[in-house]
Image: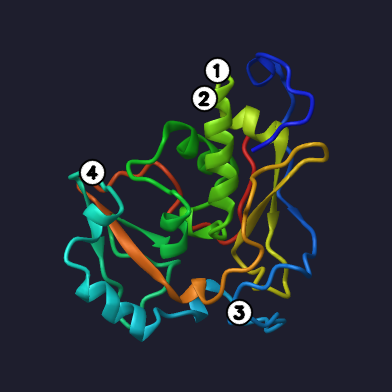
Amino acid sequence: MSVANPVAGLFAIVSIPFTDIVEEPDQDLVLSSGLARSDPEDAPNTHYINPSFRGELKNIINFEVKFSFKRNYQAVIPSPTDNVDNPPPGCIAVYLEALEHGLQLPLLKVVIEILRTYDIAIAQLIPNAWASILSFVATCKLKCLECTALAFSYVHIIQRNSKNCGGKGWYRIIGRPGFTSALDKPSSIHRWKYRFVFIKKENGDWSISIWNGLGSNKT
């Protein structure tokens, strides 16, 4: 992530209110089957796991090792009729592409703080949003800055995803003017809505939303 006019300690001292989650059309992101959709039913509860992907999950001997999960996290294969917005007890839904973009378990403290601040679930962020979050974390570490949700809100905006690309329930992250949220972030990821897995935590306490259909802002 590159930041315009960086000032040492900026993230630690800035004090501004969190901005609302906003709606803004994005005609460029094409995220479902490769074609833009305006179907009002293109929502989390209308997408079931891809049968081929479900078969792939069954053949992965140790999914947890592949994505470096800690011992108290376990992958649970969704049934053919499961949706991301209604995971089993003690579980959350995660898109495969989010894991491939660097989402790690256990969640970083700042990731939990960001999700709780905006009251959204992991699977409500489109996969390439994780490139923005993790680039932000890496930049803070590189510049020895305090990594907080407040700092994140200073350089990013969370928007409802375009209605043409399944805006119902999903959110994207863009950089504020003068800031680049992430380099080499793909503008198009195909079929991601059908490639998800449930993750079970041993004690069942995730301390974040499992799913929030609206998304809200806390100050």
Q: Residues within 10 Å of mark 1 (few under 14, many from 20)?
A: few
SS at circle 4:
loop
201 vs 49: above or below: above
Q: Residues within 10 Å of mark 2 (few under 14, many from 20)?
A: few
Residue 36 in which image quadrant: bottom right
Q: Residues within 10 Å of mark 3 (few under 14, many from 20)?
A: some
Residues at marks 2 and 3, CA–CA distance in whole angstroms: 38 Å
Marks 1/2 in contact by CB < 8 Å: the verdict is yes
From the image, tell me which residue sits under label 2.
Answer: 141
Q: Residue 13, position in %: x, y?
A: 68, 14
Q: Residue at x 68, y 63 (%)?
A: 161
Question: In front here: 208 or 166?
Answer: 166
Return the disc, 2 or 3, that comes first in the chain's sequence: 3
Residues at marks 2 and 4, CA–CA distance in whole angstroms: 22 Å
From the image, tell me which residue sits under label 3.
Answer: 42
- Report the mark closest to the observer, 4 or 3: 4
